[in-house]
Image (tube, rainbow, N blue to C red):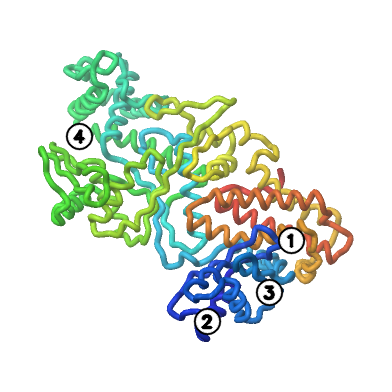
Amino acid sequence: MKDRIEQHLAEALVALQANGTVPSEISPSIVVTRTRDASHGDFASNLAMMLAKPAGRAPREIAQALIGALPASDVIRDVVIAGPGFINFFQADDAQSAVINTVLSQGRQFGCSQVGAGQRVQVEFVSANPTGPLHVGHGRGAALGATIANLMDAVGFDVQREYYVNDAGRQMDILAASVWLRYLNLAGESFDFPSNGYKGDYILAISQGLLDEHGERFRHAASTVFAGVDADEPAGGDKEKHIDALILRAKELLGEDDYRLVFDCALNSILADIKQDLGEFGVHYDEWFSERSLSTDVQRVVDKLEASGHLYEKEGVRWFRSTDFGDDKDRAVVRANGQSTYFASDIAYIDNKLERGFDKVLYVFGADHHGYTARMTAACEALGHSREKLEFILIQFAILFRGGERVQMSTRSGSFVTIRELRDEVGKDAARFFYVMRKYSQHLDFDLDLAKSQSNDNPVYYVQYAFARICSVMRQLKQRELKFDREAGLAALSRLGETAETELMTLLATYPELIQRAALSHEPHQLTGYLRDLANGLHSYYNAHKVLVDDDELRHARVCLLLAVRQVLDNGLSLIGVSTPEVM
């Protein structure tokens, strides 16, 4: 309906430009919105007020001219001027109920569109370092990233979902050293574990597997391992220098092949765990991209930046002139020892993404990555790409509460709640829904007690119960051996005149607009809010009006309405990754 009204206004504008009422050289954006007050009509447009100044006429005069030029329409029963020049549209009664037929005929495709057709978009999300299990903080990025990708897919974008596997660099070396040191403990060596090493039961499990499979192949005496190593922080030393020295010692004592074996054992174990957790959380990727695969690309982009004059050398370090592109300071890309920096890999990854032909690259990052955006857009532009091709969704933290108390989390210390534990406690559906309920830029207080409750205060339970309630009506229909004729119901939609019925039909009609708006703004919380409103409308209607009435015609029409509501609930919940149980 909204699209049809916009088209009618466009035709009226052409007519006014043809007769000279409005200058022909202007081309305003025609916007039609739903009214908040039904007494003001169903839709409204401010087009007349936009045209008034260039036309040199009063807005209400332009509004009247536009109304006079509107083509005849069987879906609009009245058009009026309101306030300073708004044009309000009242749709015909049968046009309002027509949405039920549209929903039932389109089914799962209702709400989908092609607004993004022809545009390739990559959504990268989670991409947590494989140094430990995913915790509840990663869960919000997983739920939001997956839902954003689903929404963009629903409106026609060609979407690729990607996870960037940080399988190289210092953090992975710390992980490998941590696993090896725990292996030495299990093999009988006694020493104080480094304060900056990775702790937690998962490290012990990996180390035990290493010992079970390879025996004492990697064992070295603790005295040899720690000989000459800088003191750790508890002993008055520097914990960073201590762990770096232990990494070097691991590489020296194990040799290249055995060190790589330990490294890969740790990496593969944790990565397999991550893939399993995300899969069971309903999150799937088209590509798991390895940082190691960028080894040749890093040198290539460094050379490319060098050739274009965007690098300089100072004290043996090669710097990228990122301040030339709006960053607050220049960034190192090659250290004095010749090793490339993490940022150099990020630059190579940006170039790799855009060389793959994506029109837009969407990064779903935690809010702690705020400082990365300026340097990454700077690198993008320096490489010859438009900075507009990169877009960043910075997600605020999810704070978990159990029994009213905040749960502290730290991957390094091993004290954290994993996605798996969260899923086991509250279920996938509650976790996915709760994670996207609030706008990504707002902090999320995740209340476990509420998520587990089977009450109307639990939003996911409330929405799922609306779906199950309609399924219950359909079972009652069969149990009572009452007839239901869909075609007869669609033919009798004019019988649906209750206020609660018209409100439900209006909500159904807004679903496609909602999906497009949520997709383009990358705001899944708009969808959860809509589903709660739709569920509330269904529950209110069901409690106030009998559906399985004796009047066959009215019963058929009301069941059609409920089936349309059920379909939209199903469509919306599936985009969030939430199931639709028929019995609750």
In the rendered structure, the answer to whether residue 128 lies left or right of residue 296 reads right
User: Please, which residue is most extreme toward the bottom here?
Assistant: 19
Question: Circle 4 sits in a helix, a strand or a loop, which is it?
Answer: helix
Badge 3 amino acid:
Val
Using the numbered discs, state the Cα–Cα distance from disc 1 to disc 2 in whole angstroms.
38 Å
Tally the marks: 4
User: Please, which residue is most extreme toward the right here?
Assistant: 550
Using the numbered discs, state the Cα–Cα distance from disc 3 to disc 4 in whole angstroms.
75 Å
In the rendered structure, the answer to whether residue 299 lies left or right of residue 39 reads left
Badge 2 amino acid:
Thr
In the rendering, which numbered label is found on residue 256?
A: 4
- Where does the image place residue 396, in percent across and percent down from the top left? 45, 40
Question: Circle 1 sits in a helix, a strand or a loop, which is it?
Answer: helix
Q: Which residue is mark 3?
A: 75
Using the numbered discs, state the Cα–Cα distance from disc 3 to disc 1 in whole angstroms.
16 Å
Quarter of the figure with the N terminus: bottom right
Q: Nearer the viewer, mark 1 or mark 2?
A: 2
In the rendering, which numbered label is found on residue 377?
A: none
Badge 4 amino acid:
Glu
Q: Nearer the viewer, mark 2 or mark 3?
A: 2
Question: Which residue appears at 59% of the width and 77% of the height?
Answer: 66
Q: Which residue is mark 2?
A: 21
Q: Which residue is mark 1?
A: 502
Q: In the rendered image of this protein, does residue 407 appear above or below residue 5?
A: above
Q: How dense is the environment of label 1, judged by Cα within 10 Å: few (below 14), some, or many (20 and up)?
A: some
Q: How dense is the environment of label 2, judged by Cα within 10 Å: few (below 14), some, or many (20 and up)?
A: some
